[in-house]
Image (cartoon, rainbow, N blue to C red):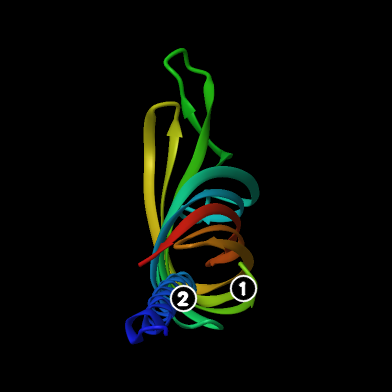
Amino acid sequence: MISHATRSAPRRSLALVSAMAGLLTAGWCANLSASETGLYAGASFVQTKFDHDWAMGSNTSIINVDDEDQGYKVLVGWRPIRWFALEASHADLGGASSNTSVVCVAAVGFPCPTKLSADVRSTQIAALGLWPAGDFDLFARLGANYWDADARIADGSVTIARDSEDDVDVVYGAGAQYRYERLALRLEYEHIALGESDADVVSLGVTYSF
């Protein structure tokens, strides 16, 4: 005869295995949810191409300056559902520079060239529409961009004049990211309006979901 204790042992083992499987499944789902939704933060390397127009007074301007520089971006976001996120970011876009028509008088009495340079920063609030595909997300960005720029005309290290400007304009773009647990590798393109100028920005960075 098989005892009652002997018959109940397999049942207890089955119950234990089921409980462990349930805990593992719950943990996996929690990690998946954390990687897809919730709060996140990140940082990116930025490559900027400027199409820059700038004027300092009526006689000092540079038009259609094509220049490139590097910078960085930091961001924080909230993704309440898989298909939508709100994101705030701040970026140092680098700077653009060009020779100007303004000349200075060197010590020897000959004119010397001057250069106008502008350093640009961007702070954004944007909405992201996301299209999840497995561990990948495709997304589009649309938002408001508060930018400020500091410009100076200089002869080498000697500053001849300074000016600054700021405004609020539109930003839009698109990108893709690959998620692995709580980390995501992101590649993105953005078009940032800067008053009469604009910038095309490509960034590569990582985000971490909390």
The amino acid pointed to by label 2 is Thr
Kind of residue indicated by mark 1? Phe
- Mark 2 touches mark 1? (CB < 8 Å): no
Locate residue 195 relative to residue 122 in the image: left or right: right
> Is 142 drawn above or below residue 90 in the view shown?
below
Q: Quadrant of the N terminus?
A: bottom left
| Residue 120 in view of the camera | no
Question: Is 20 drawn above or below residue 89 in the view shown?
Answer: below
- The residue singled out by tag 2 in the image is 25
- How crowded pointer 1 is (Cα within 10 Å; few <14, some 14-19, many 20+) is rated as many
Above or below — where is 7 with respect to 189? below
Q: Residue at x 41, y 65 (%)?
A: 89
Could you tell which of marks 2 and 1 lies nearer the N-terminus? Answer: 2
Res 106 quadrant in image: top left
Q: Residue at x 50, y 41 (%)?
A: 116
Which x, y percent locates residue 75? 40, 63
**What residue did someone put label 1 on?**
139
State the CA–CA distance, disc 2 to disc 1: 29 Å
